[in-house]
Image: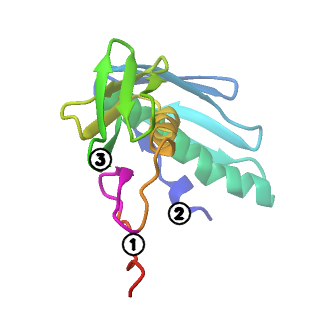
């Protein structure tokens, strides 16, 4: 049995959930999110909790059980607290700044990188070496942070590049004489 799937997702005050068919829609203070589950699970809302049950005992139904419950939990977390990824820029002359809806990155290239921020995500650059990506969709926040990091991944010798704030860069020793 799925240990994750067994537990119902509690709805905090100010959050409502509705199920129509296989689609769960969660409304909260930060916005509205929805998720369409597969036909392998049954989703019900009862007394301020969303519960997910598998239909049958097939392997796929058991796999979808825990995954669907986690997706619903992420919807609830997104509309109440939101998701946040913090990036750090290391390197001489490397910096970032926001201009309207465009993140301008100076990363040692012969040109500035203009990163267009997609809808549904807020990107801020409080300091020239720190970038914060926030939003209610966990997948979108993570993808935008990964796309920004992709422009200059941290290298192992000096640690220059864009890294996640909690990421550890394994450092290598340079060549010796």
- Alpha carbons under labels 1 and 3: distance apart: 16 Å
Q: Residue at x 39, y 86 (%)?
A: 176
Location of residue 133 (image quadrant): top left
Visible in this render: residue 47? no
Which residue is label 3 attached to? 88
Q: How many marks?
A: 3
Closest to the observer, 46 or 131: 131
Closest to the observer, 59 or 140: 140
Q: Residues within 10 Å of mark 3 (few under 14, many from 20)?
A: many
In the image, the segment drawn in magenta is 157-167
Which residue is label 1 attached to? 170
Which residue is label 2 attached to? 3
- Pick whichever of labels 2 and 1 is earlier in the sequence: 2
Visible in this render: residue 16? yes
Location of residue 107 (image quadrant): top left
Q: How crowded is mark 2: few (under 14 residues within 10 Å), some or many (20 or more)?
A: few
């Amino acid at each position: 049995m799925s240990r994750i799937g067994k537990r119902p997702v509690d709805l905090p005050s100010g959050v409502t959930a509705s199920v129509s068919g296989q689609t769960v829609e969660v409304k909260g203070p930060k916005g509205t999110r929805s998720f369409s589950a597969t036909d392998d699970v049954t989703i019900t809302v009862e007394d301020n909790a969303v519960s997910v049950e598998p239909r049958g005992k097939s392997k796929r139904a058991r796999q979808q059980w825990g995954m669907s419950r986690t997706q619903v939990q992420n919807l609830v977390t997104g509309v109440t607290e939101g998701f946040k990824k913090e990036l750090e820029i290391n390197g001489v002359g490397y910096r970032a700044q926001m201009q309207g809806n465009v993140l301008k990155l100076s990363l040692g290239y012969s040109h500035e990188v203009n990163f267009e921020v997609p809808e549904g995500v807020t990107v801020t650059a409080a300091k020239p070496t720190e970038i914060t990506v926030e939003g209610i969709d966990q997948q979108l926040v993570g993808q935008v942070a990964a796309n920004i990091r992709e422009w200059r991944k941290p290298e192992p010798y000096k640690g220059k590049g864009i890294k996640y704030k909690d990421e550890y860069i394994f450092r290598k020793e340079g060549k010796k004489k």
